[in-house]
Image: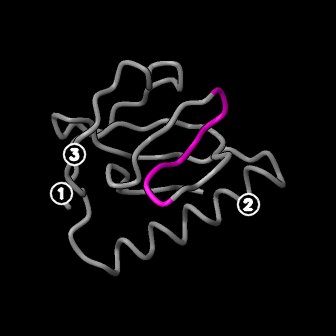
Amino acid sequence: MLLKSIHKIDKSELDQISFNKQEVLSNESDKSIRRHNLDRSLVLGNVHKRQVLIQFENILGMPLEVETTIWAVTQNHIMLKGGKTIPIRCIFNIIV
């Protein structure tokens, strides 16, 4: 994936983001790595209160990044403190 410049946003801005309906990762290996990193980030957030960088795309394909704690991971979304969510299909990288 050729990345454009990633725009860092505050978690409070997530309410104004429209998310893409399409999966951003094309191969199963990358999806498996993403799931592993999400599960690891969940433990780091709940046990150690550690924040991670979540890199994702909005509906226009613009790469965005938010630094936050992951409180829950469901089949389709991650949940952040304050009830914010990001669809997993939009996440292309998690930096621990």
> Where in the figure is residue 73, as x and y percent of width and height?
58, 55
Q: Which residue is tagged 3?
A: 21
Q: Is residue 70 above or below residue 16?
A: below
Which secondary structure lies at badge 1?
Answer: loop
Q: Is residue 72 above or below residue 15?
A: below
Measured Cα–Cα span from mark 1 to mark 3: 20 Å
Residue drawn at the location 65% of the way across and 65% of the way down = 40
Residue type, numbered disc 1: Leu
Residue type, numbered disc 3: Lys
Q: Which label sits in the foreground, 1 or 3? A: 3
Residue type, numbered disc 2: Val
Q: Which label sits in the foreground, 2 or 3? A: 3
Q: Which residue is tagged 1?
A: 2
Residue 73 image label: none
Measured Cα–Cα span from mark 2 to mark 3: 27 Å
User: The N terminus lies in which quarter of the figure?
Assistant: bottom left
Graded by Cα atoms within 10 Å as few (under 14), some (14 to 19) or many (20 or more), the crowding at tag 3 reads few
Part of the protein shown in magenta? 75-82
State yes or no: residue 76 in magenta.
yes
Residue drawn at the location 44% of the way across and 25% of the way down = 14
User: The C terminus lies in which quarter of the figure?
Assistant: bottom right
Instruction: First in sequence, mark 1 or 3: give its number.
Output: 1
Residue drawn at the location 54% of the way across and 56% of the way down = 74
- Tell whether label 2 touches label 1 (CB within 8 Å): no
Which secondary structure lies at badge 3?
Answer: loop
Residue 43 image label: 2
Residue drawn at the location 47% of the way across and 49% of the way down = 77
> Where in the figure is residue 58, as x and y percent of width and height?
26, 36
